[in-house]
């Protein structure tokens, strides 16, 4: 019989309450404590003791903790857990600065602790199916990735703008589904809602294999949209992560007999397939994968190193928007180039 893992949670906000719900029902895991200085006025802690400090949680004895407090506190809390030898699943983005993300990577890796980042789109059924199909070569050579992530402003977000909050989803999932790294990014941002942070971004980038990337992300639309398309030599995959639907639009297989058009090597519309895929709750899948990683199973999680790369690209997006230049991203500091 497998011994139960003792888990803790830090933060009972809009995401923390869902983490508490999943942890409380997770097989082979016991939720032993929840940290929130504001208490649990809504009853979201699932009956677990509600504590005021991370130190109290560490004293209880936990194998791992989920960090769901505001982004600005991720580094401080993560370093406390690492120092105490506690594994951690840290909500995205892993930190609010590149330097903070690097310090977290060093803290957990130097101690040999399992740590991951809650980039939950990796657990969306549509994107998991898309990634498997891309890895199997079903699309052939990949040409372009396009994402649109837009909707009304969430009043819960106060410490970061749309780039670090929403766009980090698209940055991470793009690298994850393609298996490629960003090499350059050019972006524009606007702030129209009266807040100090940007609320809309449009970015164009390139991946290490030459794939073109386009991201449109905002908090200014009454229409909520979560759209990812990958176009390649055999057609286009489209994932709607709101409904977890994946469709494939294939290139037509009919040969062109019209001589005047034969010289044009474009494509035409072919069959469209909507795949039937199992739809499990992404947050539950994320917790199962992290639990298994803590136990020593193969780490099918978003690592802190991958979370760091996403923060680096997000920083490059903001740098490009600020300077009006294309930013080339690589290991180390990004560099800017005149457009």
Image (cartoon, rainbow, N blue to C red):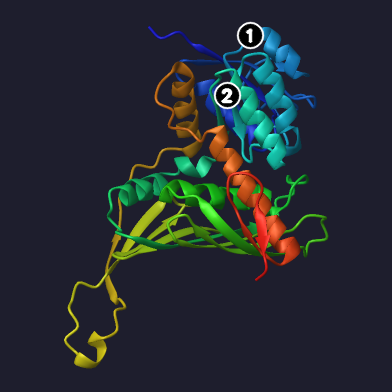
Q: Residue at x 59, y 30 (%)?
A: 19
Task: Say what secondary structure mark 2 lies in.
Answer: helix
Q: Which mark is residue 238?
A: none
Disc 1 + disc 2, Cβ < 8 Å:
no
Q: Which mark is residue 61?
A: 1
Of 70 and 154, which appears nearest the observer?
A: 70
> To which quarter of the image does residue 189 belong?
bottom right
Please state the horizontal and vertical placement of residue 12, each as a whole percent of the image: 69, 30
Q: Residue at x 56, y 19 (%)?
A: 113
Of 133 and 29, which appears nearest the observer?
A: 133
Name the N-terminal-most of marks 1 and 2: 1
Q: With 41 as the anchor, is 141 left or right in this view?
A: left
Please state the horizontal and vertical placement of residue 266, each as a whole percent of the image: 31, 78
Q: Residue at x 37, y 54 (%)?
A: 246
- Give the crowd class for mark 1: few <14, some 14-19, many >=20 residues within 10 Å: some
- Give the crowd class for mark 2: few <14, some 14-19, many >=20 residues within 10 Å: some
> In this picture, is 47 found above or below 180?
above
Quadrant where the N terminus sits is top left
Q: With 179 as the anchor, is 154 left or right in this view?
A: right
User: From this viewpoint, is residue 220 visible?
Assistant: no
> In this picture, is 267 found above or below 39?
below
Name, please, the residue furthest toward the bottom: 260
Q: Residue at x 63, y 27 (%)?
A: 106
- Residue, disc 2: 109
Quadrant where the C terminus sits is bottom right
> To which quarter of the image does residue 92 belong?
top right
């Amino acid at each position: 019989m497998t011994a139960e893992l003792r888990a803790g949670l830090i933060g009972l906000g809009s995401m923390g309450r869902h983490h508490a719900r999943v942890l409380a029902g997770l097989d082979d895991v016991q939720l032993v404590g929840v940290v929130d200085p504001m208490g649990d006025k809504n009853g979201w802690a699932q009956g677990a003791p509600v504590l005021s400090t991370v130190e109290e949680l560490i004293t209880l004895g936990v194998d791992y903790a989920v960090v769901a407090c505001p982004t600005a506190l991720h580094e401080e809390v993560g370093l406390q857990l690492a120092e105490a030898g506690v594994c951690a699943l840290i909500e995205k983005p892993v930190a609010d600065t590149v330097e903070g993300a690097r310090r977290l990577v060093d803290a957990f890796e130097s101690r040999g602790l399992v740590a991951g980042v809650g980039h939950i789109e990796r657990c969306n059924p549509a994107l998991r199916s898309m990634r498997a199909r891309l890895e199997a070569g079903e699309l052939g050579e990949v040409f372009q990735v396009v994402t649109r992530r837009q909707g009304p402003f969430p009043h819960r977000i106060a410490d970061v703008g749309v780039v670090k909050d929403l766009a980090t989803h698209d940055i991470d999932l793009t690298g994850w589904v393609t298996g490629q790294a960003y090499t350059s990014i050019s972006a524009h941002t606007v702030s129209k809602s009266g807040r100090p942070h940007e609320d809309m971004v449009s970015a164009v980038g390139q991946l290490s294999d030459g794939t073109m990337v386009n991201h449109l992300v905002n908090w200014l639309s009454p229409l909520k949209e979560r759209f990812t398309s990958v176009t390649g030599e055999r057609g286009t995959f489209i994932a709607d992560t709101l409904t977890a639907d994946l469709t494939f639009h294939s290139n037509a297989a009919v040969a062109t007999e019209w001589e005047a058009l034969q010289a044009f090597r474009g494509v035409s519309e072919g069959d469209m397939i909507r795949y039937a895929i199992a739809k499990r709750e992404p947050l539950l899948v994320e917790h199962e994968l992290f639990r298994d990683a803590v136990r020593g199973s193969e780490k099918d999680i978003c690592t802190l190193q991958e979370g760091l790369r996403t923060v680096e690209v997000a920083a490059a997006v903001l740098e490009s928007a600020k300077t009006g230049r294309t930013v080339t991203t690589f290991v180390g500091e990004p560099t800017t180039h005149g457009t």
